[in-house]
Every structure is written in structure tokens, then in C-alpha cells.
Image: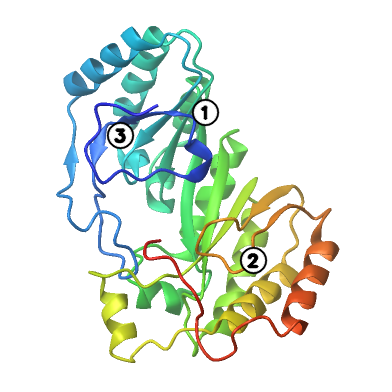
Amino acid sequence: MQSLLNNPLFRPPAEADSLILQIDEGCPYNRCTFCGMYRETHFRKKSFEEIRMIIEQESVYDQGVKRVFLADGDVMRRSYEDLQLILVELAQHLPMLARVNVYATGNSIIAKTDAQLRSLRSLKLSTLYMGLESGDEATLRNIEKAETVKVMIEACRRAQECRLKMSVMFLLGIGGVTRWQNHADATAFALNNMQPRLLSALRFVPVPGTELFEDVKAGRFPQLTEYDIVQELRTIVSLLDLNNTVFRANHASNVVPIEARLPRDKSKLLANLDEMMASGALDRYSPGAMPLWL
């Protein structure tokens, strides 16, 4: 269900059946060198009156909405007071509402106190989607992520202690040829410290209009081959020590579609990756087929 939206619109795949309410436009940071999601969008924070009107209009059409996703990038960056007002307004107009999910960053999560996080959870804020990208600090600096691994680990742990669900994403291939091992080792280490309930792997795709696309085109950032990507994924999975995590790598960018529960399915997953690497089906000389957009 989507209306009253300005393009481009991005949402996690899991929010396909949610009502999308665009309470901001664009990303307040918008400088990660790999990301082209909001490059053409000037960031605008909508006023509460605008948001109230959007909620009222949506409630006229469907009183049975159970799931809402608040767009755009890093809605969690809004103040606690803003988020509280929005969540209360949603509850008043959507009586069947069960959960509200948003994009977040480590910095926007730790800016809230534990009491504020618990309060937002009580108002039906449920899942925070956060891009780790890499657990390797050098890689994060290279892509101008503007977050540290330490902050993202703290954010994930604090949020989950406050009963919020964390969905964490990392990027295969974002360390390039020179830092793939560092990226793999450090990413697994960070994830083991986070213990996210939900985990997703996407593959780095060079997006036209981004700095990293230009680096790839100029030969300054050699990409991993298709085989290398699976090897990197296998390395990360082998190092994971997760207690209760649903892991998916079913985005169109991925070489191998995966849906598993860790630690239960770890051995089977590693065996499947080993079988694929030994099959000879993977391209060892190029990145292979890739989607046009991440």
C-alpha cells in the first residue's frame, strides 16, 4: 500500500506489505560513496502538520492497517519528541496497528536514552533497519560512512536490550580486493558482538552517479569476482557465532540466495557454499552478472 509518496522511494524488502508513510524526503547525510539512493533528492523534514494530514488521509482509506514503515532514510534521527508525537498520532488513527518500522543509524539510535527507546517501543516502534556495511573501520572510512563500528555495536545492543528488534545489513565486496579479508573478519566480529535478530547480506553494486562507481570505472577500485564474493560470504558465515538470528541473502544483487536461521543452519549453509565454490559454475575472472541498481 503506497500513496502520498514522492519518488524515489526505498523500503526494505520485508516491508512490501506495509503501509509506507513518507514523513521525510531523502537522507539527512547522503554522502556514503557507494549509495545512490537519494542523490537526486534534497533532504526535507516534513512538519508535524504535514505528517498528521498524511496519517488522517491514509486512515480514511484503510482502518485495518497493521504494519507501517516510516520513510525515508534515517527517520530515527528525528528527536524523541517528534517520534513520540508521530507514533501517538498513528495509534489514534489506525486502531489495528501492531508495529511501526524505520531506517536508523548507529548515531541516531544512541542519541536516544534507554528510557526513550523503551517508551518508543511501548508506542509500537518495532524494527530498526541499520546498515553496518562493514565491521572494518578502514573500509567505513573509505566509503565515508560517518559511523564507527563501536557506535553501531553499542546501538544494536542497547536497542535490543530495550526490546526493539534490529535488522542489520552488510555489504559483500565493499572492501574490494585489497581489504576483503579484513572486511570479512571484522564484519563477523562486529555481528557477533551485535547479535542482531535479523541479518541481511547484499552485494556491492556500482551505482552510476556515485563516487565508488567512478572509482570502479577508473580502475581505482577493482571488484571481487563472482567466486571471490562467495568465498567472502563463506568466510563471514564460518566466523559467525550468533545465538538466534534469521539470516537472508535473497536480494537480486546476491550470487547465492540464502534464507537460514543461525546457528541451527550454519553447517548446512557452509556445506552449500563449499559445494557451489567447487562446482566450477562461478566466474573467477569478473564480477559476473549484476543488477543495474542496488
Where does the image place residue 244, in percent across and percent down from the top left?
75, 47
For residue 101, side relative to residue 191 (left or right): left
For residue 275, side relative to residue 80 (left or right): right
At 30% from the left and 17% from the top, the residue drawn is: 55
Position of the C terminus, as image quadrant, is bottom left
Kind of residue sitting beneath label 1: Arg
Q: Secondary structure at mark 3?
A: loop
Q: Quadrant of residue 257?
A: bottom right
Of circles 2 and 3, the one toward us is: 2
Residue hosting label 3: 79
Q: Residues within 10 Å of mark 1 (few under 14, many from 20)?
A: some
Where does the image place residue 92, in percent across and percent down from the top left?
38, 8
Q: Quadrant of residue 242?
A: bottom right
Position of the N terminus, as image quadrant, is top left
Mark 2 and mark 3: Cα distance apart in space = 39 Å
Q: Is residue 59 above or below residue 27?
A: above
Q: Are marks 1 and 2 in contact (CB under 8 Å)?
A: no
Residue 118 got which mark?
1
Residue 155 got which mark?
none
Mark 3 and mark 1: Cα distance apart in space = 14 Å
Q: Is residue 257 above or below residue 123?
A: below
Of circles 1 and 2, the one toward us is: 2
Kind of residue sitting beneath label 2: Val
Q: What kind of colouring is applied to the model shown?
A: rainbow
Where does the image place residue 209, in percent across and percent down from the top left?
22, 69
Q: Quadrant of residue 280?
A: bottom right
Q: Earlier in the sequence, mark 1 or mark 2?
A: 1
At 33% from the left and 92% from the top, the residue drawn is: 219
For residue 82, side relative to residue 109 (left or right): left
Where does the image place residue 174, in percent across and percent down from the top left?
46, 75
Residue hosting label 2: 256
